[in-house]
């Protein structure tokens, strides 16, 4: 299991609540920022770290990148 800091834990939890658990349920950084009530820049930085840790996957799209969970954290 990967160690997550508090903001990363908050984002993973928000992504679960938003249904971003598979590629069909992609959510943008904006969606996640609104759900967590945190600045988009903070959310974006945490998403990059989560992707590097292999917890989420980033999917480049025409407008905004989408994210979904690949590792379900306990």
Image: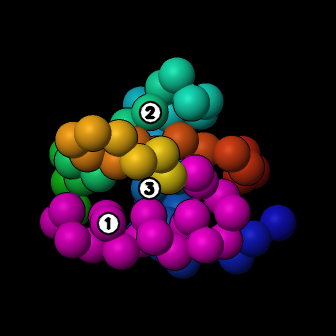
- From the image, give the main secondary structure of the stretch colored magenta: helix
Identify the residue at image location x=44%, y=33%.
26
Q: Is residue 68 above or below residue 26?
A: below
Secondary structure at badge 3 equals: helix
Distance Cα–Cα, label 2 vs label 1:
15 Å
- Local crowd at mark 3 within 10 Å, few (<14), some, or many (≥20)? many
Q: Which residue is the site of mark 1? A: 44
Q: To which residue does mark 3 refer? A: 11
Describe residue 39's horizontal placement relative to residue 8 as left or right.
Answer: left
Is residue 41 on the magenta stretch? yes
- Image quadrant of residue 1? bottom right
Point out the tag, 3 or 1, that comes first from the N-terminus: 3
Q: How dense is the environment of label 1, judged by Cα within 10 Å: few (below 14), some, or many (20 and up)?
A: some
User: Of discs 2 and 3, which sits in the foreground?
Assistant: 2
Label 2 Cα neighbours within 10 Å, binned few <14 / some 14-19 / many ≥20: many
Give me the residue at 57% from left, 64% from top.
Answer: 51
Place of residue 52 in the rendered image (x, y in percent of width and height, measured from the top left): 61, 73
**Apparent side of residue 22 relative to residue 64 in the rendered image (left or right):** right
Real-space CA distance between mark 2 and mark 3, rounded to the nearest whole angstrom: 14 Å
The disc at residue 26 is 2
Q: Earlier in the sequence, mark 2 or mark 1?
A: 2
Query: x, y percentage for residue 2?
Result: 75, 71
- The residue located at (19%, 62%) in the rendering is 40
Instruction: List x then y, in percent, for residue 62.
Output: 27, 39
Task: Say left or right for 53 vs 49.
Answer: right
Up/down of 19 relative to 70, above or below: above
Is residue 32 something one can see in this rendering?
A: no
Magenta stretch holds residue 18: no
Q: How many marks?
A: 3
Which is more N-terminal, label 3 or label 2?
3
Q: Which residues are magenta?
A: 39-57
């Amino acid at each position: 299991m990967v160690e997550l800091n508090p903001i990363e834990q908050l984002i993973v939890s928000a992504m679960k609540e938003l249904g971003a658990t598979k590629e069909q349920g992609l959510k943008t950084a904006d969606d996640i920022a609104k759900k967590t009530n945190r600045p988009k820049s903070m959310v974006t930085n945490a998403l990059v770290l989560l992707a590097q840790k292999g917890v989420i996957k980033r999917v480049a799209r025409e407008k905004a990148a989408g994210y979904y969970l690949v590792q379900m954290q306990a």
